Image (spheres, rainbow, N blue to C red):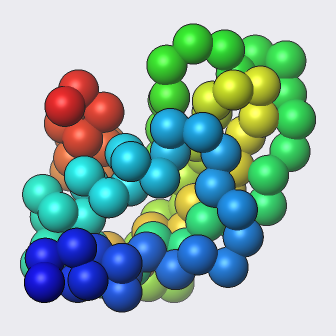
Amino acid sequence: MKLRKVQGKLKVEHSIIDGVRDLLQRLLEENPQAIRSVIPGVIRKVRDAKGEVRVRVTVPTTNGWKAIALSAGARQELFISTTLNKEELEAALDGAASR
């Protein structure tokens, strides 16, 4: 039942780069009330995306934040619908990444 709730909040309209799906699922499991949904966006190849998955919160949107995930030689936009401010969201992402 818990996984179904998480799957409902993670909108998979595009593919997701390696390692990012697990991070997003942990983020949603740890913050069920604060995060309404996560929508992965466009994937582009980049040279500086090596090593562990990194997520950088970039700009505010109408209902949350836009973030950039870097992993496996690619970057992916993430649109996070949330009530958290930038610092709280960055802390939640760091917590999900460290697990």
In this rendering, would 98 be left or right of 11?
left
Q: Position of residue 74 (x, y in %)?
A: 77, 35
The total of numbered circles placed on residues is 0
40 up-or-down from 37: above or below: above
The quadrant of the rendering that contains the N terminus is bottom left
Q: Residue at x 44, y 83 (%)?
A: 63
The quadrant of the rendering that contains the C terminus is top left
Q: Choose between 84 and 93: the one closer to the eye.
A: 93
Q: Residue at x 58, y 75 (%)?
A: 12
Q: Position of residue 70 (x, y in %)?
A: 63, 33
Report which quarter residue 33 is drawn in: bottom left
Q: Choose between 8 and 91: the one closer to the eye.
A: 8
Residue 86 visible in the current orientation: no
Q: Residue at x 49, y 19 (%)?
A: 52
Q: Residue at x 25, y 64 (%)?
A: 28
70 up-or-down from 8: above or below: above
Q: Position of residue 88 (x, y in %)?
A: 20, 50
In this rendering, would 79 be left or right of 92?
right
